[in-house]
Image: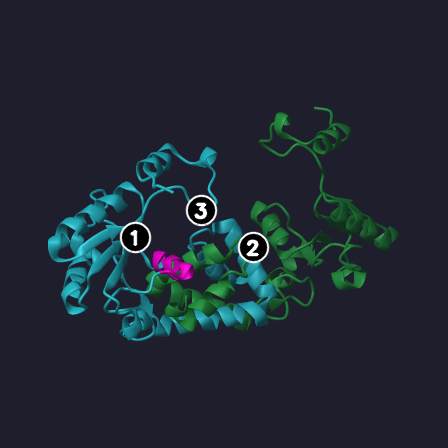
Chain colours: A green, B cyan
Amino acid sequence: MADAGTEIETLIELMAKLPGLGPRSARRAVLHLVKKRGVLLMPLAEAMAEVGRTIRECLNCGNLATGDICPICESEKRANGQICVVEDVADLWAMERAQVFTGRYHVLGGTLSALDGTGPEELRIPQLRDRIAAEDVREVILALGATIDGQTTAHYIADELGESVSVTSLAQGVPVGGELDYLDDGTITAALSARKAL
Amino acid sequence: MADAGTEIETLIELMAKLPGLGPRSARRAVLHLVKKRGVLLMPLAEAMAEVGRTIRECLNCGNLATGDICPICESEKRANGQICVVEDVADLWAMERAQVFTGRYHVLGGTLSALDGTGPEELRIPQLRDRIAAEDVREVILALGATIDGQTTAHYIADELGESVSVTSLAQGVPVGGELDYLDDGTITAALSARKAL
């Protein structure tokens, strides 16, 4: 591909590092970008540079923000005494899309993992403890993945916070619109043991 | 996602327009970019801007180039009297990766299509005719896809060029490493009718 110029090669190599794209789809994406120079390539270059310049992590909760503090931590309306602990900003976005949680968040930035050597210090857990007193938090809602690492992290945080605050976690059960036939045994077991009277 | 800032939203919307990415994978890619700001986000923004500034279509063959004429058309070594006609720059790259063709290319920019209303004028076919005389071409190799539109285009070009030059096309048959069991009937038929003595 020497004929395509080193500029194109560099762009393909960088694009191939994005999750979900490999060398082949990166080439396809770059050709698409070149064809749509005015409406896609140049706006995308600008949008990336702009995000790179302005976006950083909220010093309080770890959400993405344009300033030191994100809009959710800045809003007095969201100081309702609840903090929802999530693994990642993607999970925070998922919660926000559901438009049902009105408190603040705390983004851990991962889960505890003996395998990867991720300990509590890497995970913003000390900061969570600080916030409980500072923001007069009554309830910590653990919205962590139903994986081994996610559940280990949840139990660690619950132990760590102790009696200082009420710690809850998202219910496990049948997803809305889910059919029993397609669910794994673990979900059915969890849903059965958490069954409710109608 | 108002919390993530309009900069992030804009970037996600643009990324979702890339082939192979949807809204969900665009969000994932953007979060990855933000995490890898120094090593991926900023270099990617610069590479895109650079490609947007410098890359255009070769006036002679339609390949991507940093100047008016691409390196292949500029190289005297590649003026061997052969022109390989491809549909798209991606196909030109595929031919170059195989490192077996030593002539020049002609990128059509698509195939004839009655459905999409793509006629010969949209496809750089007139320019191909001009190049045959100008570059003293002896053979035109049609490397077009084995689709209905690809084959229609191949036949149209062969008719158009007439006796002025020898027109060939890539052989059809069993792909190297291919197993008969996984091939479609059309490929097996083509491979059988083009069988060779060992």
Give the foreground label among 1 and 3. Answer: 3
Q: Is residue A127 left or right of residue A33?
A: right
Question: Looking at the image, which is closer to me, A138 or B56?
Answer: B56
Q: Is residue A8 left or right of residue A171?
A: left
* Badge 1 and badge 2 in a common chain: yes
Name the chain under label 2.
B
Query: Can residue B95 be found in the magenta stretch?
Result: yes
Question: Looking at the image, which is closer to me, B198 or B113?
Answer: B198
Residue B91 visible in the current orientation: yes
Which residue shows up at 45% across the image and 54% down it? B16
Q: Earlier in the sequence, mark 1 or mark 3?
A: 1
Task: Give the magenta part as a residue range.
Answer: B90-100
Judged from this view, the residue extending furthest toward the left is: B163
Q: Quadrant of residue B78?
A: bottom left
Which residue shows up at 56% across the image and 48% down it? A97
Residue wearing tag 3:
B176
- Distance from Cα at disc 1 to Cα at disc 2: 37 Å
How far across and how far down the image is residue A64, in percent? 60, 63
Give the foreground label among 1 and 2. Answer: 1
**In what element is the residue under mark 1?**
loop
Q: Is residue B173 left or right of residue A16?
A: left
Q: Quadrant of residue B190?
A: top left
| Few, some or many residues within 10 Å of mark 1 (<14, 14–19, 20+) | many
Name the chain under label 1.
B
Q: Which mark is residue A26?
A: none
Compared with residue B101, is residue A168 higher up or lower down, i.e. above or below? above
